[in-house]
Image (tube, rainbow, N blue to C red):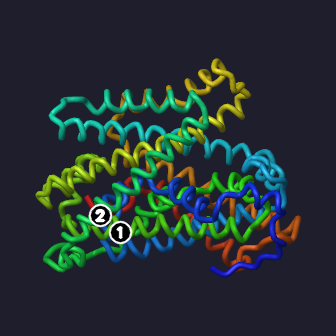
Amino acid sequence: MRATSLASSASPAALERSPSVLGGAMIIGGTIVGAGMFSLPVVMSGLWFHGSVAVLLFAWFCTLHSGLMILEANLNYHEGASFSTITRDLLGRTWNRLNGLSIVFVLYTLTYAYISASGSVIHHTAQAMGVELSARAAGLAFTVLVAFTVWLSTSAVSRMTTLVFGAKILAFFLTFGGLLGHVQPAMLLNSGAGDHRYWPYFLVTLPFCLTSFGFHGNVPSLMKHYGKDPRRIRACLVGGTLIALGLYLVWMLCSMGNIPREAFKDIARQGGNIDVLISALGSRLDSANVDLLLTFFSNFAVACSFLGVTLGLFDYLADVLKFDDRPAGRLKTAAVTFLPPMLCGFLWPEGFLHAIGFAGLAATVWAVITPALLARASRIRFKSPRYRVWGGTPMIALVLLFGVACAVSHLLYTLDLLPVWR
């Protein structure tokens, strides 16, 4: 990506406390890659492999640049200025309230999605071990464990996330190393008889792709780490999003190269949850080792995403509701954070795909539309002297168009007005 940076290097004090660029990229990559990746082959089976690659590249390009637009605006404020502070100052209180509501909605929806996903994954894992455990009970029990970890402290979440993320990366390479050896080119190219229409299913994939590249709340946090150093922060965003894109493309190759397109209809009819997809891959490959590795990876992926999302929601609600950081205050925050999505998880345990889609609808506001508006307002008020995203007004227009297309697509999907591969 080409960008114009007019900033001088960060101060020695800022650099001294800064983590490496690789560390920042891993934070972004770890935030993006989670259980949401399991929804991608199911919702993109209509487009199939070649269409999925094209749409993922387009979504990566647009979401990366919306993140860079947050950076552009953020650099005009003090280190530690929150997304809310910047939005309120540049776009006004009304838009900031709308933006705040969209953030809360997305984080609550993702928390519910991960409760649903964790129950599904743990249920599948328990079955493989010969233990009978319902998805509802598994999801609620795991949520209580996550809630306890978040209640303890941010450092407890950090230590747990580091451990789980390391295990997730190891499981990823072990799992997909085995799957790649079983990829069938004819299946990947859908060269047999059947439906060869692909692009009618394009619009329905957009909200899911947007949700799968969510990292935007981390941009102000990176500036706290690196100081006002746009080159290094930009390198973190580009590197982290490329890591995620690469992992997604490998996952699409492995899943669509091992499961025929027609079989995804049945997976979607069963709810499209993680355990269904893992079972389908295991049965196609007839490999206990691959099935076991997929099960381990899915557990780590859900745990990592679950911890990151709920910590963000916990901190945001604590700030908005002014709950203190003592144990009693953190207990109140934990209750507000976890009880509503736990209730939804108990009532609707199979809602993973629907929840991810609704999160994509709300994420269009704070992850795509708001950043584009912030960049435009920042250039008018400050002239963006430290850093400016390349592409000028056309780039802002493209990002806005992507956000609007995602929102409209989800509304049409909800009204059953879009063709779906089912």
Residue 407 visible? The answer is no
Q: Where, quadrant-wise, is the N terminus in this rendering?
A: bottom right
In the image, residue 346 above or below residue 268: above
Circle 1 residues within 10 Å: few <14, some 14–19, many ≥20? some
In this image, 69 relative to 194: left or right?
A: right
Residue under the image location 26 percent in, 36 percent down: 123
Residue under the image location 27 percent in, 64 percent down: 255
Residue type at numbered disc 1: Val
Residue 65 visible? The answer is yes
Q: Which residue is mark 1?
A: 250
Residue under the image location 40 percent in, 45 percent down: 302
In the image, residue 228 above or below residue 88: below
Residue type at numbered disc 2: Phe
* Quarter of the figure with residue 132: top left
Q: Nearer the viewer, mark 1 or mark 2?
A: 2
Give the SS element for disc 1: helix
Marks 1 and 2 close (CB-CB < 8 Å): yes
Give residue 90's mark.
none
In this image, 341 relative to 223: left or right?
A: left
x, y percentage for residue 99?
Answer: 68, 48
x, y percentage for residue 90?
Answer: 82, 56
x, y percentage for residue 278?
Answer: 24, 52
Whichever of labels 1 and 2 marks the residue nearer the N terminus, that label is 2
Q: Which residue is mark 2?
A: 176
Give the SS element for disc 2: helix
Circle 2 residues within 10 Å: few <14, some 14–19, many ≥20? many
